[in-house]
Image: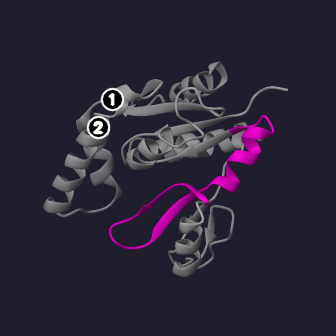
Amino acid sequence: MQKGKLVLLIGPSGVGKSVVLKALKTGHPEYVFPRSATTRMRREGEGDDLYHFVSEGDFSRWLKEGKFLEWAQVHKGARYGTLLSEIIPAIDAGKTVIREVDVQGFKSIRHHPDFVLGATKKLNTIFILPQSEDQLVRHITKRAPIAHDELKRRIDSMKAELAVAPQTDTQIINVEGKLGETIRQVEEAIASS
């Protein structure tokens, strides 16, 4: 049986990770796309396909019990976490698990005992880069109006995130207007690892 693996898609906000992830979900039903656990409130019309909605108490208990591969609190608000139960059984069954994470999640996962160098579980990391920093700023400002201070904070965050790219297994530039090529390169990176 083919050995399973965890593939992390990493990159700054606005680079196109979620579009790539959506294409992978559509084109590769053989991959596993785990749900996050979150303490945020369910939005109107939102189902259970992306999140396990849990109470603060359950999240804290699961954290103490070591049930998370990684977790984060977003802007001092809701907490989000990747449950080991959504990842490890699929890898053990020989499946490829695809997970979009931020830089903080990447750093946590690569130091997790199941995934450190020489561990029993295979980890493949793919960083999606913008064609240029200006391209990314345009994508961020095109989404919605943004205050100058918030834009500066996001640019600083983007620069810190981009500095992590060399630590990943593969770096792929998402060239403007060539999303199909980016998706193809991601598919190749997943298949060759």
Tell me if mark 1 has few (under 14), some (14-19) or many (20+) residues whose alpha carbon lies within 10 angstroms of its own.
some
Q: In the shown orientation, is residue 115 left or right of residue 26? A: left
Classify mark 2: helix, strand or loop. Answer: helix
The foreground one among 108 and 66 is: 66
Asked whether disc 2 touches disc 1, contact meaning CB atoms under 8 Å apart, the reply is: yes
The kind of residue tagged 2 is Gln
Q: Marks 2 and 1, how far apart in space? A: 6 Å
Residue 24 included in the magenta stretch of the image: no
Residue stretch in magenta: 67-96
176 or 12, which is in the foreground? 12
Spot occupied by residue 47 in the image (x, y as percentages of width and height): 67, 71
Which residue is painted at 20% across and 61% down in the image?
A: 150
Secondary structure of the residue carrying tag 1 is loop
Asked if one can make out residue 30 in the rendered structure from this viewpoint, the answer is: no
Q: Quadrant of the N terminus?
A: top right
As drawn, the label of residue 135 is 2
- Label 1 sits on residue: 131
- Place of residue 166 in the rendered image (x, y in percent of width and height, measured from the top left): 35, 25
118 versus 45 height, above or below? above
Residue that lies at the very extreme toward the top in this rendered image: 192
Q: Which quarter shows the C terminus?
A: top right
Three-letter code, disc 1? Gln
